[in-house]
Amino acid sequence: MSMKLAITDLLPLPNCSTKIPRLGFGVYQSSPSQCVQSCLNAFKSGYRHIDTAQFYANEAEVGKAVRDSGIKRSDVFLTTKILSAGGSMQKSYEKCLASVERIDSGKDGYVDLFLIHSPNSGKEKRKEMWLALEKLYEEGKAKSIGVSNYGVGHIEEMKSYAKVWPPHVNQIELHPWCQQKTIDQYCQKHGIVVEAYCPLVRNYKASDPTLVEISKKHGKTTAQVLVRYCLQKNWVPLPKSDNPERIAQNADVYGFELAEEDMSKLDSLNQGASGALVQAVDNN
């Protein structure tokens, strides 16, 4: 099961010309004062994909980091998310447009991916936000659109109102302790790209004996093993750190490969929904 991977690898999105880098950099809880520098450190380490959200309150800083980096806008993939509906499709659309403006201002500004952050607001608000994202997508203000924390039922429900289906991406919590196999298999079957948030389990599992054993075997950090695990699962991991050394380490995962035996051992750690730190999806 040899997987020759590189930090420059891209994955195609379903029914869409956009491709997504298969390694991303998360900025959740990266304060505005820290965020710009962390993104610049990420770019230096080879990342070209940053994941922010309205809820993180650092969209403008992500945009500033891109401008300060000197990297061409077209060479960077930027994601953001809408958490709560505005009260009408137009108001939700305006909330999304404000995000685009914060990240990439000007008449040609855009984001590469816009997600609905959560399904928890109920069916009507999910619909409202999706129709707003579709408008953004039609106008080229979002090059792709998707969802986060959506289970099978949520994605199936979209068929009743969505012009763009399937969603291009579903971003969910994924790591050896929370593998979310039902929704993962559903997404893979429909070509939906699966992004993994909390891939490092916020370091809570750094002393897990199985993980430590595999990291020692390869001479890698436990975080590097977890990122590599996600890549070999065909997920798009979004490791997060504000530590420059760790940012670099978490991207340095291409000089080794986890054997089938290693993957099986990590697979065996699955605790289902109880292994989630943030949220396991509801598939009903």
Image (cartoon, rainbow, N blue to C red):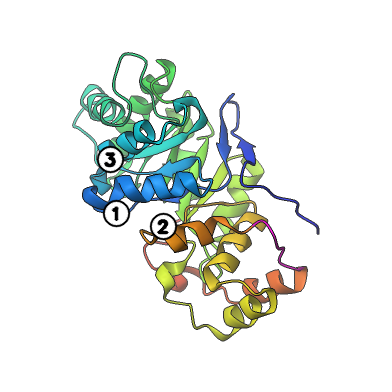
Among the two numbered marks 2 and 3 on one chain, the one whose residue lies closer to the N terminus: 3
- Secondary element under disc 1, as helix, strand or loop, is loop
* Residue at x 70% of width, y 50% of height: 5
- Residue 135 location in percent, x, y? 37, 20
Q: Are marks 1 and 2 in contact (CB under 8 Å)?
A: yes
Question: Which numbered marker is on residue 151?
Answer: none
User: Which quadrant holds residue 147?
Assistant: top left
Label 1 to label 2: alpha-carbon separation: 9 Å
- Residue 247 location in percent, x, y? 45, 57
Question: Which numbered marker is on residue 240?
Answer: 2
Question: Which numbered marker is on residue 30?
Answer: 1
The reply to whether residue 99 is visible in this rendering is yes
- Residue 148 location in percent, x, y? 42, 46
Asked if 85 appears above or below 262 in the picture, the reply is above
* Residue at x 42% of width, y 27% of height: 161
The reply to whether residue 198 is visible in this rendering is no
* Residue at x 44% of width, y 68% of height: 201
Among the two numbered marks 1 and 2 on one chain, the one whose residue lies closer to the N terminus: 1
Question: Which numbered marker is on residue 61?
Answer: 3
Mark 2 neighbour class, 10 Å CA radius: few under 14, some 14 to 19, many 20 or more: many
Q: Are marks 3 and 1 in contact (CB under 8 Å)?
A: yes
The answer to whether residue 213 is magenta is no
Asked if 228 appears above or below 148 in the picture, the reply is below
Asked if 38 appears above or below 115 in the picture, the reply is below
Segment colored magenta: 254-259
Foreground of the two, 265 or 223: 223
- Secondary element under disc 3, as helix, strand or loop, is helix
